[in-house]
Image (cartoon, grey):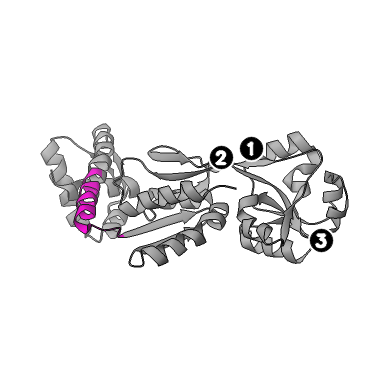
Amino acid sequence: MNLNHLRHLIALAEYQSFRKAADALCLTQPALSRSIQALEQELNVRLIDRHGKRNTLTAYGQQVVASARRIVFEAAELHRGIFLLQEGQLGSISIGFGPTPAAILMTPFLTLMASCHPKVQVKLARGSVDMLTQSLLDETVDIIVIDRRALTAVEDLLIEPLPPVRGGFICRTGHPLLAHPHIDLAMLRQFPVASMPLSDEIIHDLVTELGPEAHPSRLMTINCEDLHGMLDVAEATDAIFFGIFASAKARISAGKLQEIKLHPHFERMGQYALVSLARRSESPTLKLFRDFAHEHFHD
């Protein structure tokens, strides 16, 4: 069976138009039509119902497309596996980071690669969980490190939890709040509070343990994906940062920032994970990164 015929059918199923599918495949429409006809003749069934400009899959077509996706994926994996064996070295890796994992892992990992594996090609991407998940499904990244509570798509994904990490409220050393022996939410709300977008689970925990005034719509005055930018603001002003302590580890160790002991006590436990495509062949570099993440992702 010709793999190109299967790829052409998959494209036609996605675009539902010979013109659009042909353009995407860099083919002429007659060439695409001949390819689909050749597949229909080989299988001896009709795969496409043609209604003017509209093209829909028959029941046979739907079944063949489902199988074709698996066959094309496995064929690509066969070539990938052979390439990795022939490469005989670490090769390259593309990693997608959520904001907090990036703050904890990115610089140490780049330092390791530059020092110990200088010829390995390392590509990094940053963004939201949805954007990174789509990049993983599109195979533009090899692995992503994200907040697993925000992950919605799990089909065909390998999810490997990382150790949980503590989080809460952080302010600059010398902040006016730290002069008080007991700090409650009302006192904290007198100052700007910065946070990344929060999952529904974290929002629920905030409201349950601290009350309705802790809902981000009332508590957070700065909402931003740029974690380092928010930590810079917290270090330079009286703004308070809500997030994972390990993301500010260097600043806390240097005495620039410190944890706020809130009453009643509230502690966020961050749940993060390494996520990759199930059934995909892994390069040696990917295993190296997995081991590195487990070793370094902690408070």
- Relative to residue 110, is residue 149 drawn left or right? right
Q: Where's residue 169, x and y in %?
A: 73, 49
Q: Position of residue 262 (x, y in %)?
A: 79, 44
Q: Quadrant of residue 175?
A: bottom right
At label 1, which amino acid type do we have?
Glu
> Is 83 covered by the magenta stretch?
yes
Quarter where residue 241 is shown: bottom right
* Residue depicted at x 14% and y 47%: 2
Question: What residue is drawn where x is 73% and y is 63%?
Answer: 235
Q: Residue furthest top?
A: 59
Numbered badge on residue 1: none
Which circle's residue, 3 or 2, is located before the other in the chain?
2
Tally of numbered discs: 3
Judge the density around disc 3: few (<14), some (14-19), many (≥20) Cα neighbours within 10 Å.
Answer: few
Instruction: Write down the region rendered in magenta.
Output: 74-91
Tag on residue 201? 1
Three-letter code, disc 2:
Arg
Helix or strand or loop: what does disc 2 sit on? Answer: helix
| Residue 124 image position (x, y, % from top left) | 44, 61
Residue denoted by label 3: 174
For the N terminus, the image quarter is top left
Q: Which residue is mark 2?
A: 149
Residue 198 shown in magenta:
no
- Classify residue 88 as left or right of residue 287: left
**Spot occupied by residue 112 in the image (x, y as percentages of width and height):** 43, 61
Q: Quadrant of residue 46?
A: top left
